[in-house]
Amino acid sequence: MRDLPVIGITLDSEEPGGYSKFPWYALRQNYCSAVVAAGGLPLPLPHEPSLAADYLDRIHGLIVTGGAFDVDPALFGAATRHETVVVKKARTQFELAMIQGALKRDMPILGICGGQQLLNVALGGTLIQHIPDEVVECLAHEQPNPRDQAGHDAVLVPGTRLADIAQSLRIPVNSAHHQAVKDVAPGCVVNARAEDGVIEGIEHPGHKFCIGVQWHPEFTISDADSRLYRAFIKACHA
């Protein structure tokens, strides 16, 4: 039997329509194939907050995925909700339970896109609710070209774990978001920014592996994306 670390991957959820006339889960295949390529065993996680501890007992690392929805601004103390914000309460409740449990266990966590945003909120940070309203002359963070192509560059911060993993201080990334980290959570540091100043990555040096990136490394836009997955899986072995 091969010693493959089990990697829990959070699913998206959809209302009836399209694939099924009943509520259904969704996950792009490349979230799983990227884990396999890096040496892990992917395990998608249904949204059952009461089972979070049981899931955590069986996995070695957690990937919190993105999706076409937003973190509820009430979770980071905002008094208003931007008109563009769409929430998925049940999904967020489950993912928060998983993140909080993984942090307590010092289990490796990789937050991707919305997963990075929720990780920042779970640790005590806040979010920009709609980038075009808060960032002057912002880049097209919801890129018009396909997601398997680069949308802009991310400039990595020297001395951070992400920069060490990527072995580069500038990498091309894809971009599919209208929100971003605003106030960085206590204990976390910024490890990447876009050239318009938008935070593209965070990490918590106090944990074994706790990294969030705003782009989607499962598309492997650059070698840095593959290195990130391999570093995450390596941490799950430790």
Image (spheres, rainbow, N blue to C red):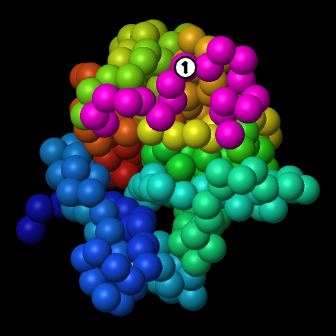
Name the residue: 66% across, 55% down: 85
Name the residue: 86% across, 55% down: 80
Q: Is residue 135 magenta?
A: yes
Kind of residue at disc 1:
Leu
Q: Which residues are magenta?
A: 130-147
Look at the picture and state if 143 lies above or below 13. Answer: above
Say whether residue 37 is left or right of residue 109. Answer: left
Q: Say which element carries label 1.
A: loop
How many numbered marks have been drawn onto this rendered protein structure?
Answer: 1
Q: Position of residue 146 (x, y in %)?
A: 28, 34
Q: Quadrant of residue 92?
A: bottom right
Look at the picture and state if 13 lies above or below 220. Answer: below
- Residue 190 visible here: no
Q: Position of residue 24 (x, y in %)?
A: 35, 80
Q: What kind of secondary structure does the magenta stretch mostly adopt?
A: loop
Q: Is residue 230 magenta?
A: no
**Residue denoted by label 1:** 139
Question: Which of the pair 176/230 is nearer the observer?
Answer: 176
Image quarter hosting the N terminus: bottom left
Q: Position of residue 228 (x, y in %)?
A: 35, 33
Name the residue: 62% across, 27% down: 199
Say whether residue 2 is left or right of residue 22. Answer: left
At label 1, counting other C-alpha atoms closer than 10 Å, the crowd grade (few under 14, some 14-19, many 20 or more) is some
Say whether residue 32 is left or right of residue 236. Answer: left
